[in-house]
Image (cartoon, grey):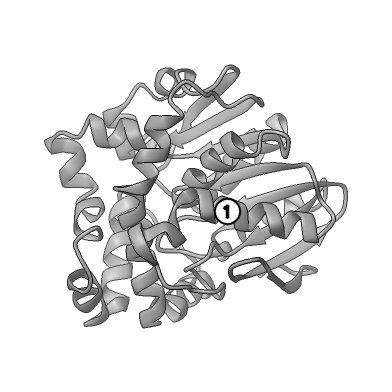
Amino acid sequence: MFEGFEVRRIETTETSIHLRIGGSGSPLLLLHGYPQTHVMWHKIAPALSEHFTVVAADLRGYGESGKPPGGEGHRAYAKRTMARDQVEVMARLGFERFRLVGHDRGARVSHRLALDHPDRVERLALLDIAPTLTMYRQTDQVFATAYYHWFFLIQPYDLPERMIAADPDYYLEKKIAKWQKAGGDTFTAEALAAYQRCFRDPATIHATCEDYRAAATIDLTHDETDLARKIACPLLVLWGAEGVIERCYDVLQVWRERADNVTGKALPCGHFLAEEVPEETLSELLSFL
């Protein structure tokens, strides 16, 4: 995977970020979701690197990036903090402005990054999310059943940590299998092995719980404070036609409440666009970016 890419580790103010970088041209940052790592981009990153300098990074708490303690109020895993990591990474690589694509948790970090650092982001693509505040405010039985992990992972330390650590492979495999298109064969053996290896680390399990705890507390405070602010750059939203986001939200409408220039569409898949339908995802991203 990632043939021709270089593995790097960048020290930031608060932690260290593991990444792969490859290609040439304008910089493009890719941010992954839960419970994965930067490896989720492996089917499309090589093709993107023919047009861009691609940086595929592990979020703090995930993969091989640093896993600092959550701290008071889970501030170490606020999306504001996680976004700042990535701004520092790109600056230290020599990129003051860049294009940005985020999936799942990485898309939530990307949303915050675009709000807090509008001068850094030229174009933004968000994959298979609605705004966090919208999703919590509109919670109903359909959403809570499908996204039960939102309410499980935010339970106080160490209930979810202990339960997941009892069999992390089982938990990860059940979680990602449920989110893909029914009957799909989404994940390569190499990618699945990478996800399992990283997720077996108790520090990863704890850090990812902290990510969700922050999303239900400090992130909501930040989002409520910034309701009047909109994403300034062009925004592309893509989501799975067979996923929860499609069933629960008018996706373009909810993002038009958060950004001035929004386009997007559903793709024929579940949650994992870049791995389920890589050709379609690549085509849409290249056209937009």
Q: Secondary structure at mark 1?
A: strand
What residue is at 21 percent from the left and 74 percent from the top? 158
Check disc 1 and give the amino acid type. Leu
From this view, report whether residue 131 is shown above or below residue 98.
above
Is residue 207 in sight in this rendering? yes
The image quadrant of residue 286 is top right
Q: Residue at x 42, y 57 (%)?
A: 75
Q: Quadrant of residue 222?
A: top left
Toward the left, the furthest residue is: 141
Q: Is residue 91 left or right of residue 181?
A: right
Task: Tell me residue 59's x, y (percent).
Answer: 54, 62
Relative to residue 137, is residue 245 drawn left or right? Answer: right
Q: Position of residue 69 (x, y in %)?
A: 42, 72
Query: How many residues crowd around disc 1 within 10 Å: few (fewer than 14), some, or many (20 or more)?
Result: many
Residue at position x 47%, y 44% from top? 108
Can you give x and y, in whole percent of width and height, for residue 202 in the image? 36, 81
Which residue is at 58% across, 17% downward?
260
Nearer the observer, 93 or 169: 93
Which quadrant would residue 207 be assigned to in this image? bottom left
Q: Percent x, y for residue 271?
A: 40, 46
Where's the C terminus, which quadrant? top right
Q: Provide the residue designation for mark 1.
A: 31
Which quadrant of the rendered structure holds the N terminus? bottom right
Q: Is residue 71 or residue 20 the one in the foreground?
A: 71
Q: Nearer the viewer, residue 110 or 272?
A: 110
